[in-house]
Image: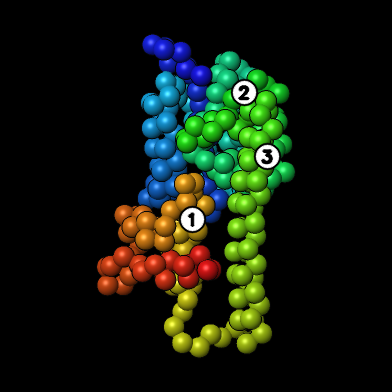
Amino acid sequence: MARKGKLVKAVAYMRTSSATNVGADKDSDKRQRAAVAAFAKRAGFEIVGEFYDPAVKGEDRIETRPGFAALLDRIEGNGVRVVIIDEISRFARDVLTQELGILALIKRGVTVLTASGDDLTNTDDPMKVFTRQIAGAFAQLEKARLVAKLRVARERKRAEGGKVEGRKTLAESRPNAVALACELSEQRPRLSLREIASALAEAGHTTPKGKHYSASAIASMLGR
């Protein structure tokens, strides 16, 4: 893509699902920005703009996203034809939403690259298109599975009169840590439970004793 000795202009697109992970003290956008910047440096791209959709779910329709709308305006206005994202679930988790968004960019002659170098807009290779769709479907399945588990837990609690015996769950006592753990689990390449625990600790989420969460605690956060 980039020609030797000359940087190709590109823009970055980022998205954060949960409002609890949005803010100056949060690192979701910072991690995405760092991944995009590292890839751009390796691949010979110059990031000339970035667009961010905070607290926008992966299944939210493309046309309702302010950041994505601004991205399209920028592309149509200044000729930039490369968009770089952290990884595919940052673009969209729902397969239909993902495909509609990518098609909207393809129609504008735009290439969408992930920080790992995957070209999401490559339609010449049927296997790449299939792999992109499978990755999106898997992310959608994982999200649906987690949502279903949380719904069952809420319904069980209501059936018991809204009271829970014993200690609070991590989702109740550490909602921000659980939200970040879920987001980290969606990253590709997939992080191990211990790597997620280390990332949580770096973000200030530790046990009451100030230690890293155990692998079993992380698994509990993820509903495994």
Q: Earlier in the sequence, mark 1 or mark 2?
A: 2
Is residue 120 or residue 209 the one in the foreground? 120
Q: Disc 1 on helix, strand or loop?
A: helix
- Is disc 1 surrounded by few (<14), some (14 to 19) or many (20+) residues within 10 Å? some
Q: Residue at x 42, y 37 (%)?
A: 35
Q: Nearer the viewer, residue 178 or 42?
A: 42
Secondary structure state at the residue bearing disc 2: loop
Which residue is under mark 1?
A: 185
| Residue at position x 58%, y 15% in the image | 79
* Residue plotted at (42% across, 31% down): 39
Task: Give the class, few, some or many, for how many residues have Cα within 10 Å of label 3's Cα (few <14, many ≥20).
Answer: few
Residue that carries the numbered disc 2 in the rendered image: 110
Could you give the CA–CA distance between mark 1 and mark 2, rounded to whole angstroms? 29 Å
The answer to whether residue 36 of the structure is visible from this angle is yes
Give the percent coordinates (x, y) of residue 67.
58, 36
Q: Looking at the image, which residue is at 45% across and 59% down?
A: 181
Q: Position of residue 80 (x, y in %)?
A: 55, 18
Above/below status of 94 relative to 68: below
Say whether disc 3 or disc 2 marks the residue closer to the N-terminus: 2
Mark 2 crowd level (few <14, some 14–19, many ≥20, 10 Å Cα) = some
Amino acid under disc 1: Ser
* In-image side of 143 versus 179 (left or right): right
CB within 8 Å, label 1 to label 2: no
Residue 176 shows in this picture: no
**Residue 130 — which label?**
3
Amino acid under label 3?
Phe
Q: Quadrant of residue 202?
A: bottom left
With 151 as the anchor, is 47 left or right in this view?
A: left
Secondary structure of the residue carrying tag 3 is helix
Specify the label residue 193 is tagged with. Answer: none
212 and 80: which is toward the camera: 212
